C-alpha cells in the first residue's frame, strides 16, 4: 500500500506542479482540472494494471491523494481476488 501511495503522490504532484499533502483537495479546489483527472486515471490504469470505471471518477474517490490511494488499493485487491478464481 505504501508503494501505491508514493507512486500516486508523485503522479499527482507532477500534475499539480506543487508539493501536496495527502488530504489536499485536488478537484474541488481546481488543483487538477477535469482533463487532468482523465490524465491521472490513464496513468493509474497503466501503472497499476487496473480498469477504472467512469462512474468511479467521483469526488469521493479522486479528490485527494489519500482517497485516490485508497481507491486504487481497493481496486487492486478486487482484481487479485477475481484472478484467484480463474
Image: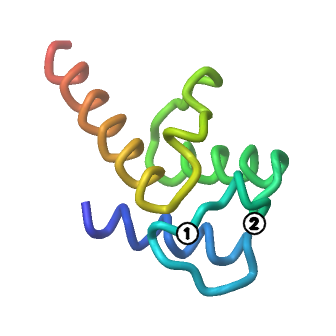
Query: Where is the N terminus found, in terms of image quarters?
Result: bottom left
Label 2 SS: loop
> Residue 25, position in %: x, y?
60, 61
The residue shown at (59%, 41%) is: 59
Return the residue found at the far left.
Answer: 84
Q: Which residue is mark 2?
A: 31
Q: Is residue 61 left or right of residue 37?
A: left
Q: Residue at x 62, y 68 (%)?
A: 12
- Taking the image as shown, residue 64 lies to the left or right of residue 30, namely left
**Camera-side residue of 23 and 15:** 23
Element under label 1? loop
Question: Residue shown at 60%/68% (left/top)?
Answer: 11
**According to the image, what is the colour scheme of the structure?**
rainbow
User: Do residues under tags 1 and 2 come within 8 Å of each other at their CB atoms?
Assistant: yes
Q: CA distance from mark 1 to mark 2?
A: 9 Å
Q: Earlier in the sequence, mark 1 or mark 2?
A: 1
Q: Quadrant of the C terminus?
A: top left
Residue that label 1 marks? 24
Amino acid at each position: 500500500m505504501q508503494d501505491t501511495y508514493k507512486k500516486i503522490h508523485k503522479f499527482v504532484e507532477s500534475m499539480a506542479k506543487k508539493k501536496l499533502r495527502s488530504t489536499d483537495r485536488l478537484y474541488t479546489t481546481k488543483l487538477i482540472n477535469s482533463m487532468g483527472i482523465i490524465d491521472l486515471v490513464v496513468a493509474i490504469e497503466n501503472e497499476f494494471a487496473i480498469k477504472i470505471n467512469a462512474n468511479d471518477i467521483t469526488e469521493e474517490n479522486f479528490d485527494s491523494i489519500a482517497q485516490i490511494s485508497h481507491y486504487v488499493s481497493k481496486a487492486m485487491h478486487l482484481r487479485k481476488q477475481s484472478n484467484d478464481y480463474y
